[in-house]
Amino acid sequence: MSADIKTLRNRIKSVDSTLHLTKAMGLVASSKIRRAQENMKKSREYKDAFESVVASLASSRECENSPYLKTVQDKSTKIIVIAGDRGLAGGYNANVFRLAKEYEDAEFIPIGKRACERFSGELYFAETFSKADALNLSKRLCNEFENGEYSKLGIISTKYVSMMTQEAQIKWILPLVKDENKKDTSILFEPDEITILNTVMSEYVAGFIMAEVKESFASEVAARRCAMDSAGKNAQQMIDDLELSYNRARQGAITQELTEIVAGSNT
């Protein structure tokens, strides 16, 4: 009986330590949420504005000969995979990798420590990923696309729906898709549309990557906070159950000792 009591006491201490850890990680995630959401919103606005301009350029007849609108068959596909730098974020990383499995023939470019551990490539941390990193990566990818080294560029990231919901998704960046219904004549481009399009593509791809990284990081922080809240509740429930078992075992041991004492005195 004493061995059971000692085991329960040690178990309670262990779960209590885990509870303190989950609370601390939840507080850290909470402190990062506001800034992550603000950065995500700014990046979304920048990307949407840039997308509108690029869509106007791509819809013009002059840009039909741009290498960024040409579709080449039977060429390799490159996919940027954005995951987290750490775990303990529920299914955040697992959902990204599950989606990546659907494109096994693609060449993956990882962003985030967990993605870099899974796919070989240069180490980029998602939390500290900068505009300079995005621009350097974008210039390399655009040059390779222009040279015909691959035919399609996509990005797997996580869409921030709400604090409780985040969804893994894939978006295709290159080649550009011409929108026949978009004919915006209110913008005048100098010197000409195709020159502007070819010049700004590296900035456009960099902005796209940066926006997806910021949104993925906001999703990671939200997922971690929810996971830590859930883990904290489960740990507290486990402590309550263990304490109940401990009290019962302790009471049983005391009752047994009293019984033995009474029996001994009667003899």
Image: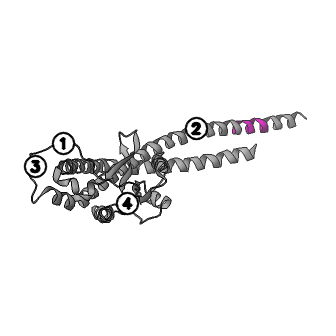
Is 99 inside the magenta-drawn segment? no
Tag 2: amino acid: Asp
Earlier along the polypeptide chain: callout 3 or callout 2? 3
The numbered dot on residue 9 is none
Magenta segment range? Answer: 250-257
Q: Are marks 1 and 2 in contact (CB under 8 Å)?
A: no
The mark tally for this picture is 4
- Can you identify the residue that label 3 sits on? 187
Find residue 262 and report its image quarter. top right
Q: CA distance from mark 2 to mark 4?
A: 58 Å
Q: Is residue 8 above or below residue 196?
A: above
- Can you identify the residue that label 1 sits on? 182
Q: Is residue 65 left or right of residue 221?
A: left
Tag 1: amino acid: Lys
User: Where residue 147 sits: x, y (%)?
Assistant: 32, 65
Element type at mark 2: helix
User: Where residue 66 sits: x, y (%)?
Assistant: 23, 57
Return the residue nearer the eye: 218 or 76.
Answer: 76
User: Which of the two discs, 1 and 3, sits closer to the camera?
Assistant: 1
Earlier along the polypeptide chain: callout 4 or callout 3? 4
Element type at mark 4: loop
Earlier along the polypeptide chain: callout 4 or callout 1? 4
Element type at mark 1: loop
Q: Is residue 95 left or right of residue 16?
A: left
Return the residue nearer the eye: 180 or 85.
Answer: 180
The colour style of the image is one colour
